[in-house]
Image (spheres, grey):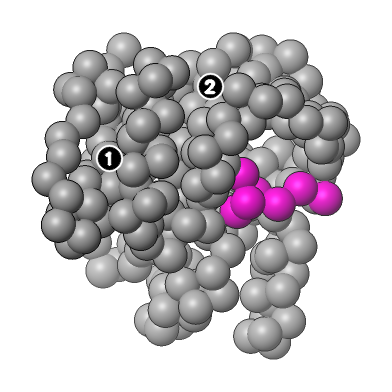
Amino acid sequence: MSTRAVTGSLAAICLPRQLFPVTTRGRLMSGIDKRPVDGPIQVLTHGIWGDVQGDREHHGGLFKAVYAFAREQREALARSTGRQFPDGFFGENLVTAGIDTDGAEIGEQWRIGSTILEATCQRTPCGTLAERVGDPRFGRRFTEHGHPGTYLRVLQEGEISAGDAIEVIGRPGHGVCIRDAFRGLNAEQAAAVLDWSATSGTVLYSSLVNAAVRALEKSGSVRSHPAALTSDGRGS
């Protein structure tokens, strides 16, 4: 894994202010309504202390322990829609500045404060996001914008504070980034990320593995990935 002296900063840390009722999901109460909080804040294996996920089937777990979204991209969405989206509005835990969260390679490692985090997969817009914005078409607009932000797993627990530097301390070098996964992997990208996982022994999120296998199947290549290197992140 290569290292690079690329840094950004942690502009804000956001946690739920109150639970958000998702009327299209029956009794579901979501933790998407996040607001900036004072630090330092503890980051544990399963996420930031004080965070809440209402839909545990699709959110949370080891591979989606922390969600980072660039302030620059949220502001771009605000300009394109004529809306105001404050820090945390999209449910992001970490508001970043000066770093391309979508350009992070799968498996890229960041040091923030005393934590080490690893980029795992992209955010997929859901009905809860559309209801939060108040626009049933917002999921499509978010997808067309093409900057989903990245989920992170916690490799080293610790504390973070707003203003901390974000340092990229390791990059796998396979060239497949979060943006690629969001747009849909091609066969070459799929093979690259699966080969890297097999060579490095890095466990991949099961949804990413499934997407990679499907991309290879479309190209006529039949391939599986070791079960020991595939996980949905729901273990301890």
* Mark 2 crowd level (few <14, some 14–19, many ≥20, 10 Å Cα): many
Provide the secondary structure element on which disc 1 rests: helix
Q: Closer to the camera, 43 or 147?
A: 147
Q: Give the label, 1 or 2, closer to the camera.
A: 1
Q: Specify the label residue 65 is tagged with.
A: none
Q: How many marks?
A: 2
Q: Position of residue 145 (x, y in %)?
A: 56, 75
Q: Amino acid at mark 2?
A: Val
Q: According to the image, label 1 marks what residue?
A: 209
Q: Is residue 199 visible?
A: yes
Q: Residue at x 46, y 72 (%)?
A: 143
* Mark 1 crowd level (few <14, some 14–19, many ≥20, 10 Å Cα): many
Q: Would residue 165 appear left or right of 66 to someone viewing this image?
A: right
Q: For the C terminus, which image quadrant?
A: top left
Q: Position of residue 95 (x, y in %)?
A: 71, 47
Q: Position of residue 15 (x, y in %)?
A: 60, 40
Q: Closer to the camera, 172 or 38?
A: 172
Q: Amino acid at mark 1?
A: Val
Residue at the extreme front: 220
Q: Would residue 27 appear left or right of 54 to someone viewing this image?
A: left
Provide the secondary structure element on which disc 2 rests: strand
Marks 1/2: CA–CA distance: 19 Å
Q: Closer to the camera, 152 or 176?
A: 176
Q: Residue at x 77, y 20 (%)?
A: 113
Q: Would residue 122 appear left or right of 203 to someone viewing this image?
A: right
Q: Residue at x 37, y 57 (%)?
A: 185
Q: Position of residue 188 (x, y in %)?
A: 38, 52
Magenta-highlighted residues:
98-104
Q: According to the image, label 2 marks what residue?
A: 154
Q: Is residue 61 magenta?
A: no
